Image (tube, grey):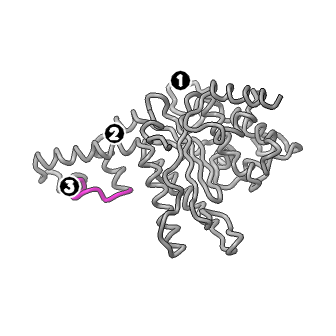
Amino acid sequence: MPRPRKSLICLEDTPYYHCVSRCVRRAFLCGKDRFSGRSYEHRRQWVENRLLKLASVFAIEVCAYAVMSNHTHTVLRVDKSHALAMSPEEVLSRWHTLHNGTLLTRQFMNREQRPSLSESQLKTVLNYVDIYRKRLYDISWFMRLLNEFIARKANTEDECTGRFWEGRFKSQALLDESALLACMAYVDLNPIRAGNAKTPEKAMYTSVKRRIAKAKENKQPLELLPFVGGSQNNKAKGLPFRLDDYLHLVDQTGRQLRSNIRGEIPRNCEPILSRTGLTQTDWSAVVSSIESNFSSKISLALVKRKTVLSHQLAC
């Protein structure tokens, strides 16, 4: 029986979550349908554009993402403190980029009309601000506005109605840094495992490709939560790892994928930092099982227990 969403997302436990949405129809989200011969590849750009736009509006940041042929992966970080620190004007300004709001909230945002609002009307506006503020750090609202937007566009293009996604999205809480790192690598390696790309830097519509492209310019993508590991600024907000270490991890893990997986990074490839111009534990086992072996929560302790058990059963 599915667990209530509120029991799966608890910001007191962790701000990091892995979210997956899958298509319900045979017609693909993206890619080419081998039955009809019709290509849906352009829809990948729809998803990527919408995802990054929502990240610029919500107090929710994107750590990693991959847009596949019939599903999407995102790793998100909820910044509740950022949402709580927003002024009423900023909350309404952000929400109005996605929705019209109400007549009163639009009047409040109009400098000329605001003085005409009564005290009771201003109180009503502030009530709306509280509602919108909570939505700006709500993963369910984030995924709803991502998936509904794509479903409507796809249904319009397909000239049909009905459900486009398999119900609501699946979410997994990432309870520690090891789980976060493993899950990000899992997401970025999705096109490799599916055989759609040979190397991470050639995996279209993924966060790792976007990060590598910016790294060549000695920058990090503004649309993604940055890597700040090793930063002299201890208060810097971002992923607590070094970018080069993460790329090494992705590269090495991609070379060690299991035999039952369709694709892997060729063993004779140069190291990722060399070929793009720019020693860990058994991360291969951790990353390859990140979605299939865990239901709603992931931590390093759970990973270790699963790995030990699988080795015992194999003996």
- Which amino acid lies under the numbered mark 2 shown in the image of this protein? Met
Q: Nearer the viewer, mark 2 or mark 3?
A: 3
Q: Looking at the image, which residue sits at the far front?
A: 1
Task: Specify the segment rendered in magenta.
Answer: 98-106
Q: Is residue 98 above or below residue 229?
A: below
Image position of 147 with respect to 61: above or below = below
Residue that numbered label 2 is attached to:
86
Amino acid residing under circle 1: Asn
Rendered location of residue 315, percent (x, y): 83, 28
Which mark is drawn over residue 234?
Answer: 1
Lower position in the chain sequence, tag 2 or tag 3? 2
Answer yes or no: do the residues labelled 3 and 1 have beta carbons within 8 Å? Answer: no
What's the CA distance linking mark 2 and mark 3?
19 Å
Residue plotted at (45% across, 44% down): 139
How far is disc 3 from disc 1 in space, using C-alphas? 42 Å
Residue nearer the viewer, 204 or 9? 9
